[in-house]
Image (cartoon, helix red, strand yellow):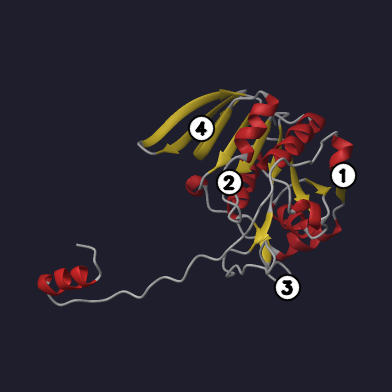
Amino acid sequence: MAALRALVGVKRVIDYAVKVRVRPGGGVVTDGVKHSMNPFCEIALEEAVRLRERRLLQDIVVVSCGPQQCQETIRTALAMGADRGVHVEIPAPEYETIGPFQVAKILAALAKKEGVSLVLLGKQAIDDDCNQTGQMTAALLDWPQGTFASELTLEGQQLTVEREIDGGLESIRLKLPAVVTADLRLNEPRYATLPNIMKAKKKKIEVLKASDLGVDLTSRLSVQSVQEPSQRQAGLKVETVEDLVGKLKESGLV
């Protein structure tokens, strides 16, 4: 087995099936709302587990940043096959103010501390859709990056990434250590089995603070307001082209 270690980021987000509601005064309603692991993070974790099953990785460390509830997400990751869990605890009020740059600083510091050769992240989170954390982490570490990965091939210290771009597919070769972000078609994550869920409950999770990693979480950005999108106007069916032209004229569009 190759002595390679991977760090996988797993973010706790509002479940994809939940309708998000805007909270009066700013932000979104999170109390009493179902949360789960970000789907793209699940894909990144699944790929790490598959690499270990092929004896290409030795150890998988998962990390989640945020309030105490993030440990539920880490337990899920452990049940899916991760070896160790790290929780970088950030109180909920402070967590709402941080962005991809602050998270990238945490991931970069943790990658150095753990001595990993591969950082696997989801390409984006479904709550903020920033698609920035992976790229920023690679820049802070000065490591090569492969984003929007739809296929990974690891051979020794060489990593071939097939990535989705606007014109089709692009293959790039990276030398480890590297940062990779997972796209939707990279794999289909497994379900955690009941025995593994029970084992994960007994595993110890290492709890750190950002200051333990020498990371300053001060943000230079602030959210001024959050608003729900305006209600969509009802459509109108017409029978003929003449009716369509008539309606457009009535609306002053032609």
Mark 4 or 2, which is nearer the eye? 2
Q: CA distance from mark 4 to mark 3?
A: 40 Å
Check if mark 4's residue and mark 3's residue have beta carbons within 8 Å: no
Q: Secondary structure at mark 4?
A: strand
Q: Is residue 250 rendered to the left or right of residue 21?
A: left
Disc 4 marks which amino acid?
Val
Check if mark 2's residue and mark 1's residue have beta carbons within 8 Å: no
Query: Looking at the rendering, in which quadrant would you find the N terminus?
Result: top right
Pointer 4 residue? 161
Of callouts 4 and 1, which one flags the residue occurring earlier in the amino acid sequence?
Answer: 4
Q: Assess disc 2: are there few (<14), some (14-19) or many (≥20) residues with their C-alpha within 10 Å of its C-alpha.
A: few
Q: Nearer the viewer, residue 141 or 57?
A: 141
* Occupied quadrant, residue 254: bottom left
Please name the residue that numbered disc 1 is placed on. Answer: 208
Vertical order, 183 against 2 (above or below): below
- For the residues bearing labels 3 and 2, Cβ distance under 8 angstroms: no
Numbered disc in front, either 2 or 1: 2
Q: Position of residue 248 (x, y in %)?
A: 21, 68
What number is the disc on residue 130?
Answer: 2
Q: Nearer the viewer, mark 1 or mark 3?
A: 3
Mark 2–mark 1 Cα distance, whole angstroms, equals: 25 Å
Q: Earlier in the sequence, mark 4 or mark 3?
A: 3
